Amino acid sequence: MDTQSVVARIDRKHPGSILKFIKDANEIVAAAGSFPQLMKAVHEENFDMLVDIVGIDWTPRIPRFDLVYLLLSTADFTRLRVRLQTEEGQEVPTVSDIWHSANWGEREVYDLLGISFSGHPDLRRILTWKNFDGHPLRKDFPLQGKHFDKPFNPETIEDY
Amino acid sequence: MVSLKIDGREVSVPEGTTILKAAQGIGIDIPTLCYHKRLPPIGSCNMCIVEIRGQEAPVTSCNTPVEEGMEVTTESEALHAQRVVNLKKILKHHALDCPICDKAGECDLQNLVYRFGITEVPFEPRKQKRDDSYSTSLIRYWPERCIMCKRCVTACREIKGIGAIEASGEGDDARIVVANAEICRSCGECLMVCPTGALTENLSRFKGRPWLEKRVMTTCPYCGCGCQMELRVMENRVIGVTTKLDAGVNQGSLCVKGRFGYEFIGDEDRLTDPLIKENGAFRKASWDEALDLVAQKLSAIKKESGPDAIGGLSSAKCTNEENYLFQKFMRAVIGTNNVDHCARL
Amino acid sequence: MAEAKTITLNMGPHHPATHGVLRVVLELDGETIVKATPHIGYLHRGIEKLAEHRNYQQIIPLTDRLDYSSASANNIGYCLAVEKLMGIEVPKRAQYLRGIMAELARFMGHQLWLGTHALDIGAMTVIFYAFRDREMIMKINEEISGYRLTPTFFRIGGVAHDATDEFIKKVREFVKWFPKALSGYHTLLTENKIWTTRTMNIGAITAKEAVNYGLTGPSLRASGVAYDVRKAFPYSSYDDFDFKIPVGENGDVYDRYLVRMEEFTQSLAIIHQAIENLPEGPVQTDNPWIGNPALSDVEKDISALIRRFMINAKGPNAPQGEVYQAVEGAKGELGFYLVGDGSEHPYRMKVRAPCFYLASAIPRLMTGHMIADAIAIIGSLDVVLGEIDR
């Protein structure tokens, strides 16, 4: 599939939803405003599998986070990346109603990086526990953990 | 001011500046090995060579002063090839020691070899054995690791003004020799500037790797100078002392006490409890008991012979605050001016 | 009429049939599952966070511990991602050796799956045969790397060292032996009435849904989507080999079983072609900043010693940039998203774990089935918790 023409078609349908297209990496930089429309349009263009969602903490950059959606078309195996920049505390519209795999993917990003998704059906922590303090993959989270110097008491853990 | 061009970039520097310093000033990185910030240029390694327009042979940038209108090139294929040749020459006899070398991991030679991606330097043993004697027993000289950069000799002469060691011989025969062992003060200045593991500390050999240890910035406790130093800490034990070039009044130098006198910190024989001498023998006591005894005896002496019968001598190993409290105690509580300190100098 | 009541049953994390520490909370109406909620994270070791603090070489052993049942398949994905980021070409012989090791790892993964999956459903015998043959691969791993389960045999820019004659001999023996073993597996299960009754039409998922749920690997192919990273995006000389992608039709437990059984044959074909056509040449890139010098050079060459020291202690620098490299692991598309910042540590490493998305489909697959089918479904997805939790 020619990603260039896909991008051109989407751009015609939703003008302004694509900020930039990087041909070498097959990457779309999405505008925050019309993100759900863009993702719907991408899905309609046959990118039927959301392979993964990658969150990157670029602190101290503003906006702080990059979300990279890795997409794949199983019709002819074309890959596409959609990048969305987002700031701490900002909510990102969910895409779990388009691809079910985003359900857990977004939960993981929420757990490890603390990015909230609006409209997610079940936004709970997934790898850590309910009352875990902090988000481990943020750059300001220490490698050895936040409370390394205190004894660990499993009784305090609240599980779902 | 002198204006010149380095790699096509205009730069103006005061007269007498070397090309190397002028280049570093505008962020151009010329590889160096024998050059050290605190030392006068030595010019023994030929790594910092640059090309000057109009001159046939490359020159060493560390000891060539800038001239008006000079056009300097710091990177070219010929220079790179020449640097690789020079580095290989240095490496030829270098001992295959990295796995057991204390310096491995923070070694200038290693960094340069990796930076240049040097390959194929088969080891050639030296024809004659070098003597590994050194001017002080606190430092061990590993002649097979020595690359004859002469930093140690220069540091001994120029920073400390001593000249206990000297370089002798030419070519393969070159080595560091002890000129005047009796004037060596074991300050470890040579150890500090050594780019490789040719000079290592005898006290902390094989105790830990540079990347495993934690470095804690502190002030030397021995006298009132306030030299800055870094303790090398591994598994909560001090295994050595290093210095940072730009830190504190000492700018990286230390004396023998600061650099080698750290073993008392973790010493087995260090007192952990107060001892009271009774009938000619010491016994362990609690702090309360010991302090009560001291207070009682001091009051008795004061009552009997007056406060001036008591004198206090404080320790340089205490902090400033502790020393202040001590003199305050002597003056206000005991009531005497007989107070002194071993680091009064 | 009495009000319909459901009971909640907690399964795991210490349930032997969850193949690790997966916990599923089942809501049951009688014996029928009305809702299943998987809980994960009991094996979370923070590998992605750890990777940000280690250099590129030191991360390789961490990747072994993702899907520990097929460790080399993870190594290859990670090494390829780093090589893509750094722009290094790996010598052909190393690519072939990597292919052989990765396919052997697939065998190990599938044999573990076959044995435990059958054991879960009640077929005791299979695990002994599967583990007998798995032992042969363990021995091969031990021969080439010294480790049985987690070989860590790959390096950035190639493999640790060249294959020994003993290794090649053992691989040939395995290739010769395995078809016989495979037909034994088939005799035990494929047409077994109990087996087919327990697996057919259980946990079926359509192709469209499977894609939407992000399933990959045998679980996706069982639904009829011929997506295999080895064919779709060939890497490490896989396009040199002639092999087929087995696909199923119904996407149920039985089809997933058949697809994996056929993968044994195809992997064997790849190993056979690779070992017989093993090219001569170096097994490490000649790039002096990345290629780890051989130990024999280190003993007599100071530059090799220093480079080996620096490469292992400090590690090579990777340029700035972001890459995604996927490989076909034993469970599906295993991807590494690497962000380099010019230093010797990755700025961010994201592992696209196939089992993570397989586990996310558990509620969809289990709902409506009997409680006894729950373990059949978990077994057929072949989830490994080391990879889900990272």
Image (cartoon, grey):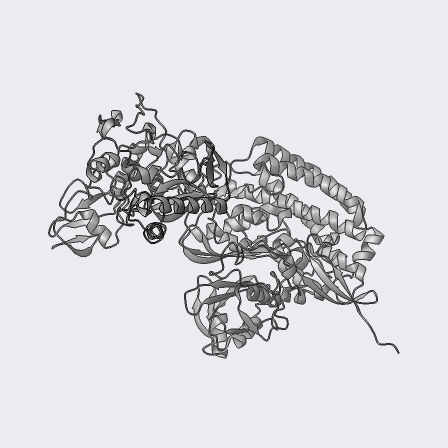
User: Looking at the image, is C186 positioned above or below residue C253?
Assistant: above
Asked if residue C262 lies left or right of residue C278, the reply is right
Q: Where's residue C339, x and y in %?
A: 46, 57
Asked if residue C230 lies left or right of residue C258, the reply is left
Q: Where's residue C324, x and y in %?
A: 50, 57
| Residue C377 appears in view | yes
Q: Where's residue B275, x and y in %?
A: 47, 38
In front here: B26 or C10? C10
Identity of the residue furthest to the right in this view: C1
Asked if residue B255 lies left or right of residue B97, the reply is left
Quarter of the rendering containing residue C103: top right
Q: Residue at x 48, y 63 (%)?
A: A56
| Residue C315 appears in view | no
Quarter of the rendering containing residue C341: bottom left
Q: Residue at x 50, y 77 (%)?
A: A34
Identity of the residue furthest to the top in this view: B128
